[in-house]
Amino acid sequence: MSKVTVRYWAAAKAAARVPEESVEAATLAEALDAVVSGRTPDDPLRNVLARSSFLVNATPVGRAAKESVLLDDGAVVEVLPPFAGG
């Protein structure tokens, strides 16, 4: 397992109630599971994560399966919720 930082932006930051947190995870899927573990099933962060895009070390994840995105020790995962406006 790697120690990774998960950073939240905009609505994700509001839902998480923290700007970032550290978790132990080997994949993006494990990191996302770790940040919601201990939260209630109706916690708003779960809904935001389901609609968000992700960057790992500034590289877009795109449509890759979250289980296939490996995380190195020290990786930074950015959670980018959908943005409106223009």
Image (cartoon, rainbow, N blue to C red):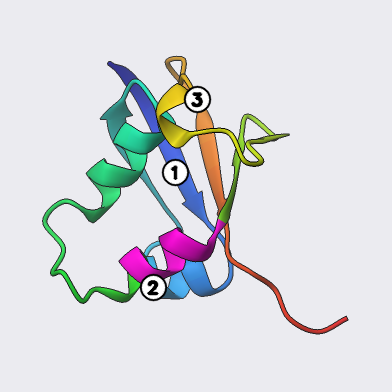
Residue 46 vs 27, above or below: the answer is below
Magenta-tinted stretch: 46-52
What is the CA distance from the residue labelled 1 to the residue labelled 2?
A: 13 Å
Q: In the rendered structure, does residue 2 fall within the stretch colored magenta?
A: no
The residue mark sitting in front, 3 or 2, is 3
Residue 63 x %, y %: 62, 41
Q: Residues within 10 Å of mark 1 (few under 14, many from 20)?
A: many
The residue mark sitting in front, 3 or 1, is 3
Residue 36 x %, y %: 24, 55
Q: Amino acid at mark 3?
A: Val
**The N terminus - image quarter:** top left
Q: Nearer the viewer, residue 62 or 24?
A: 62
Q: Tell me if label 3 and label 2 are in contact, CB under 8 Å.
A: no
**The C terminus - image quarter:** bottom right
**8 left or right, relative to 17:** right
Answer yes or no: is residue 58 visible. yes
Secondary structure under tag 2 reads helix
Marks 3 and 1, the one that precedes in the sequence:
1
Secondary structure under tag 1 reads strand
Residue 38 vs 11, above or below: the answer is above
**Which of the numbered marks, if any, corresponds to residue 15?**
2
Q: Amino acid at mark 1?
A: Val
Q: In the rendered structure, does residue 49 fall within the stretch colored magenta?
A: yes
Pointer 3 residue: 69
What is the CA distance from the residue labelled 3 to the residue labelled 2?
A: 24 Å
Pointer 1 residue: 6
Q: Amino acid at mark 2?
A: Ala
Q: Nearer the viewer, residue 78 or 42?
A: 42
Q: Residues within 10 Å of mark 3 (few under 14, many from 20)?
A: some
